[in-house]
Amino acid sequence: MRRLRTAVRKAWYSAMSASPPPSPRQSSLPKLAMYDRRGRRLQILAQQLRHYRPSDPDEPVLDDREKVSSTTVLPDSSASDDIRRPTPASVRAAVLVCIFEGDCGELRVILTKRSSNLSTHSGEVSLPGGKAEEFDADDRETALREAKEEIGLDPSLVTVVTNLKPFLSKHLLRVAPIIGILPDKQSFVPLLNASEVDEMFDAPLEMFLKEENHRSEEWEWQGGKSLVHFFDYRTGKKTYLIWGMTAHILIRAASIVYKRPPAFSEYLPKL
């Protein structure tokens, strides 16, 4: 099964690489046209986020060509804000924080519920994404490829604008959050990969800054303590629990988008 999955990914990558990619100026033209049709707020947000850079100069950042610079150390932001661990280049993953405008003009983010048949994190809420493949050029490509595989999101519909500080999972996997804008939500027709995803839904991004439906717990991790966040999100007749690294990434993303800190403590106080 693993060989078949890798073969499919390589075939997809070959198809994507068959012709030279357009320049950033060329590739942005149709997306800018979508912004004009769908609303100026997303265009302003995209311009704002393109200027964002992680605060630490050692962190990987997207340059003007949307390529990711490599790094040899990783801030373990899921445990504490200042722990660094060497991370092999092969142990990488990326997730897509895909933002779009809801019917009432609010900013929303796409989430998935992982398949109950998966060996790890089965049934949990996550962002589209996964482990890097050897043929991925950078974190951006990993996030877009995985989103395509998991929920059928065409990369051409997404404008990648920046990345966040990488996180380190409990399995010592370096996870790079990539922020993308979906200007025309109506053009996205989800196609879920049943072997990886049970459900897809979306939630308001601003909720990850509010106390409402939020709680946190102190957990021990790698010999230290960390603050783990939980959000209960109800939509229709379903309630989803969004927690752990996914919640932490969304708190960080919402803080940057809305330019304000959450109404709760994001980390434990430093002693």
Image (spheres, rainbow, N blue to C red):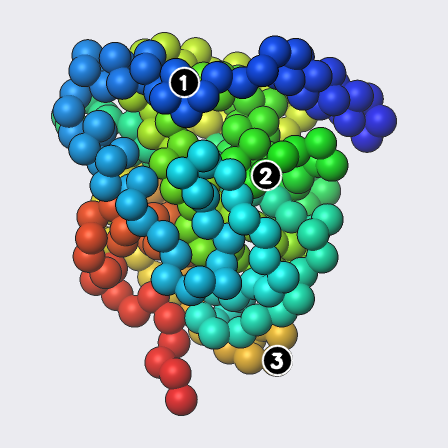
| Residue nearest the observer in this picture, 88 or 228 | 88
| Residue nearest the observer in this picture, 57 or 89 | 57
Percent of width and height locating residue 12 = 67, 17
In the image, which disc is placed on residue 223?
A: 3
Task: Name the residue type under label 2.
Answer: Asp
* Residues at circles 3 and 2 in contact by the CB criterion of under 8 Å: no
Q: Earlier in the sequence, mark 1 or mark 3?
A: 1
Can you say which quadrant of the picture contains the N terminus?
top right
Q: Earlier in the sequence, mark 3 or mark 2?
A: 2
Q: Quadrant of residue 171?
A: bottom right
Callout 1: helix, strand or loop? helix
Percent of width and height locating residue 84 = 57, 71
Callout 3: helix, strand or loop? loop
Evaluate whether residue 237 shows in this view.
no
Residue at x 29%, y 21% (from the top left corner): 183
Q: Which residue lies under the disc numbered 2?
A: 138
Task: Name the residue type under label 1.
Answer: Ser
Residue at x 45%, y 34% (from the top left corner): 65
Residue at x 53%, y 29% (from the top left corner): 144
Tell me the crowding category of disc 3: few under 14, some 14 to 19, or many 20 or more residues within 10 angstroms, Cα based: few
Q: Nearer the viewer, mark 1 or mark 3?
A: 1
Real-space Cα distance between discs 2 and 1? Answer: 18 Å
Task: Name the residue type under label 3.
Answer: Gly
Along the horizontal axis of the image, is 194 left or right of 167? right
Tell me the crowding category of disc 1: few under 14, some 14 to 19, or many 20 or more residues within 10 angstroms, Cα based: few
Q: Which residue lies under the disc numbered 1?
A: 27
- The answer to whether residue 231 is above or below residue 125 is below
Q: Nearer the viewer, mark 3 or mark 2?
A: 2
